[in-house]
Amino acid sequence: MAEKDAEFIVPPNRIKSKVTYNDSGVDMAALARAEQVIANLQGNYLQWVEDDLTNLQAAYEKARAEPDNRKRHLDEVFRIAHDVKGQGGSFGYHLMTIIANQLCRTIEKYDATRDDVLEVVKLHIHALRLVISQRMEGDGGAAGASLVKGLEAVISKVAAR
C-alpha cells in the first residue's frame, strides 16, 4: 500500500477528559493530593497483600489436595495473583508486580494441573511472601533481581518438559 493510500485513524483520548489540567499543564496540586492518598494507603496495602497472600496459599493448598478440582482452584490462584500484580507497583512494591505477573503467565501458558508446574506456582507464592516479609520495596535491588532470575530458571526447566 502506497503512503498516499494510507488512512490515519486517531482514536479519541478519553483519559484527557478525566485529568484536571489547565493552560500550564496538569494540575500539580491535584496530582500531589492523589499521590498523598496513595501514600496514606501504604500501610493498608501491607495488610491487604497479607490477606491476599493468605488466600493465595489457601487456594494453592486446595489445588494440591484436590487434583480433580485443581483447575478451578488454580483459577482462583490466578485471580488473586492478578490483583496482587495490579496493586504492587501502585504502592512501591514493583517486585510483587513482576513475580505475580510471572505467576499468572505460568498458569496461562503451562498445564498448571501438572505436579511440576504446581511446584512452580508454590515457589512464586513463597517468593511473594518473601518480598513482603522482607519489605523489599521497588525492584528489590540485587536480591530482587536474583529472586526473579531464579524463578525464571525454574520456569525454563518446566517449559523444557
Image (tube, rainbow, N blue to C red):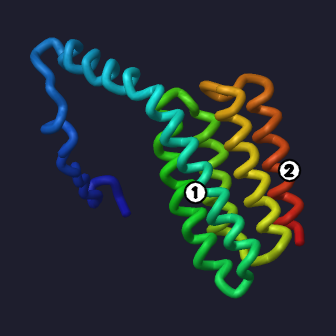
* Label drawn at residue 153: 2
Which mark is on residue 97? none
Q: Establish if 114 lies above or below 140.
A: below
Q: Looking at the rendering, in which quadrant would you find the C terminus?
A: bottom right
Q: At which x and y percent is residue 10? A: 22, 49
Q: Closer to the camera, 155 or 86?
A: 86
Give x and y (percent) for residue 15: 21, 41
Front position among marks 1 and 2: 1
Among numbered discs 1 and 2, the one appearing first in the sequence:
1
Residue carrying label 1: 55
Which image quadrant is residue 57 in? bottom right
Left or right: residue 95 versus residue 151 is left
Circle 2 Cα neighbour tier, 10 Å, few/some/many (<14 / 14–19 / ≥20): few
Q: Quadrant of the N terminus?
A: bottom left
Circle 1 residues within 10 Å: few <14, some 14–19, many ≥20: some
Q: In the shown orientation, is residue 14 left or right of residue 152?
A: left
Outermost residue on the left side: it is 23
